[in-house]
Image: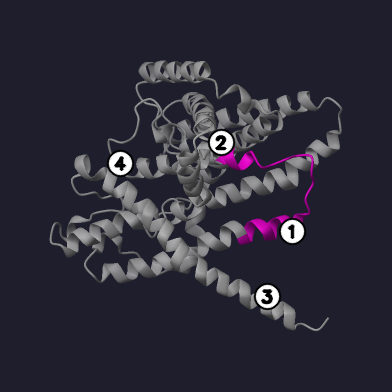
Amino acid sequence: MLRGIGILLVVSGHASSGSSMNVFAPYSFHMPLFFFISGLFFSDSKVDGVLPTVIKNTKSLLLYSTAFYMFYACVCWVITRLGFTAFAQPFSLELIFLNQFTTSGAYSFTATYWFIPCLFFVKLYFSLIHARLVSLINSRREGLISISFLAAYMVIAFAAVVYSVEMYEKTGVQLDKIIYFRFAFALFFFYLGSIVAKYNVQRFLSNVFVLAVLYIVQQQLWVSAGNLDFWMQISKYQATYLPVISSVLAIAFFYGLSDIAAKNKSFCVVLGYIGKNSLPIVLHHIFGFFLINALLCAFGVIKPSDVINLFYQFDTVHTWPLYIIGAVLFSLIFDRYAVQPVMNTFKNMDLLSALKRPQ
């Protein structure tokens, strides 16, 4: 359910509409939230093998995103010839295989894919390096070790923000650096999720009084700072301390809120289903925005030349709910009725091949 809330906020943020909240604006926490959620399922008490870990995460993350990089490269080639010239981009193997590790927006509809390789490297780090460090220490003071690592990763996160701010003050975005900056920033939130799950910290967050305090603190932070937004994609932060603090506060607030909402069966069904399918929504919701614009073009409301970028919306003030709902529904339908059947076909082929092998 927390993931369902998070992905709806991601789509809302990308819809560039008035639907975002001033206090818990999506761009003040939503990507750290997803690293946090991934960390909830990590335990450093188990040391995984190197090759199995790399293969597992490559198959579940990188192969999936790269396949859709190729798909949307073809889509951009087609729609450019239909008059949507803003999406023109050469079909390049370099862009398909390497761009997702930097800005990820080469083919417009893949702009959100940067998160996937970043998560890939974060998961590899914790499975292959962090878990081994913990096993080497082998101390009975488990709590002290957890606190020490959490403090270390927090310092690394703050350092990443400091150097990112310094980078923009001097030269602007440098693609060879942002990969390391956002990786360093993500480490803390992934491990924070692991600690919360390990010590069952969430039991303190579903109290209405606690949520009210978190809300008031975030409100005061927003008022004093004036702006809490940051772009983790390109490591663009507005201050050296706000991104970490605003993310932690918002994660705690929405974790507690999701725990309360989980007591309602209707919320469980809807947000649970959306949360389980958050990856397809990440992959396809921006193309969902475009399809709405394509329909508007077909009905003569706008022209293809009016669609100037991937986030273009017609009459944003009045139509933002249409773009959010349409993008989510398209992502879910496309994945269920187009992507999943293809994947099941390949899985069945692998199973048949395995059965035919001589024992």
Residue position for label 3: 351
**Which label's residue is closer to the chain start, 2 or 3?**
2
**Labels 2 & 1 near each other (Cβ < 8 A):** no
**Which label's residue is closer to the chain start, 2 or 1?**
1
**Which label's residue is closer to the chain start, 1 or 3?**
1
Highlighted magenta segment, given as a residue range = 35-59
Which type of secondary structure does the marked residue at label 2 adopt?
helix
Taking 43 as reference, is 219 above or below it? Answer: above
Mark 2, Cα crowd under 10 Å, few <14 / some 14-19 / many 20+, is many
Q: Nearer the viewer, residue 355 or 72?
A: 355
Viewer-nearest of labels 4 and 3? 3
Mark 2 to mark 3 CA distance (whole Å): 40 Å
Q: Which mark is residue 52?
A: 1
Residue position for label 2: 185
Which type of secondary structure does the marked residue at label 4 adopt?
loop
Taking 8 as reference, is 157 above or below it? Answer: above
**Which label's residue is closer to the chain start, 4 or 3?**
4
Main SS category, magenta section: helix
Amino acid of disc 2: Phe
- Position of 120 compared to 144: left or right? left
Mark 4, Cα crowd under 10 Å, few <14 / some 14-19 / many 20+, is some
Amino acid of disc 3: Leu
**Which label's residue is closer to the chain start, 1 or 4?**
4
Q: Residue at x 50, y 39 (%)?
A: 265
